[in-house]
């Protein structure tokens, strides 16, 4: 029973560490960010690229190695064998945009940190002197004159 409780305590200590929780939050936010960037690529950038390339849809690009075999009634007997490199191009563009977006966000955060570090530290406050010390200093100054 001690081994189980020790194992569970170790796991609990591991799971509750700050880094693990930060990583979990990062994964969730990263998943949502990935959806946004995928939408940006699929719905905004790739149609523009397709327009510039004469209406070419990258996701449909493929190299047919072996064409499909059809039955006399027109149904597919054997599916075609094809390399679908258009999806690869699409996913590569997705990756580049996601990587660039993350780079920009990290760089922006780094610039904020550098600005924070560049600010001079406020001067420490000098505590007010007690009244008896002030009085003794005045007497000293009068004696000097």
Image: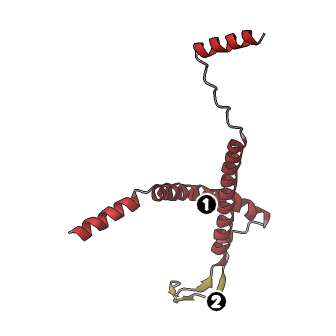
Q: Residue at x 30, y 68 (%)?
A: 7
Relative image position of residue 100 (x, y in whole percent): 69, 60
Sequence-first tag of 1 and 2: 1
Q: Which image quadrant is residue 69 in?
A: bottom right
Q: Which image quadrant is residue 35 in?
A: bottom right
- Front in this rendered view, residue 6 or 34: 6
Question: Do the numbered discs 1 and 2 sit on residues whose CB atoms are within 8 Å?
Answer: no
The quadrant of the rendering that contains the C terminus is top right
Outermost residue on the left side: it is 1
Can you say whether 50 is above or below 138 in the image?
below
Label 1 neighbourhood size at 10 Å, few (<14), some (14-19), many (20+)? many
Q: Which image quadrant is residue 97 in?
A: bottom right
User: Can you tell which mark lies on residue 68?
Assistant: none
SS under mark 1: helix
Q: Residue at x 67, y 57 (%)?
A: 101
Report which residue position mark 2 lands on: 65
Relative image position of residue 46 (x, y in whole percent): 69, 62
Relative image position of residue 67 (x, y in whole percent): 61, 88
Report which residue position mark 1 lands on: 38
Relative image position of residue 129 (x, y in whole percent): 61, 19
Label 2 neighbourhood size at 10 Å, few (<14), some (14-19), many (20+)? few
| Alpha carbons under labels 1 and 2: distance apart | 29 Å
Q: Residue at x 58, y 86 (%)?
A: 80
Can you say whether 58 is above or below 137 in the image?
below
Q: Residue at x 70, y 59 (%)?
A: 45
């Amino acid at each position: 029973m001690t081994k189980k409780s020790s194992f569970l305590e170790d796991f609990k200590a591991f799971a509750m560490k700050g880094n693990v929780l930060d990583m979990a939050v990062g994964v969730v936010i990263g998943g949502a960010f990935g959806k946004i960037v995928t939408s940006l690529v699929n719905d905004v950038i790739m149609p523009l690229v397709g327009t510039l390339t004469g209406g070419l849809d990258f996701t449909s690009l493929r190299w047919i190695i072996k064409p499909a075999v059809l039955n006399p009634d027109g149904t597919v007997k054997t599916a075609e064998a094809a390399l679908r490199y258009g999806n690869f191009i699409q996913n590569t563009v997705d990756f580049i945009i996601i990587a660039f977006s993350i780079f920009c966000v990290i760089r922006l955060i780094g610039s904020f940190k550098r600005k924070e570090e560049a600010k001079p530290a406020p001067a420490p406050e000098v505590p007010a002197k007690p009244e008896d010390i002030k009085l003794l200093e005045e007497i000293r100054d009068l004696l000097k004159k």
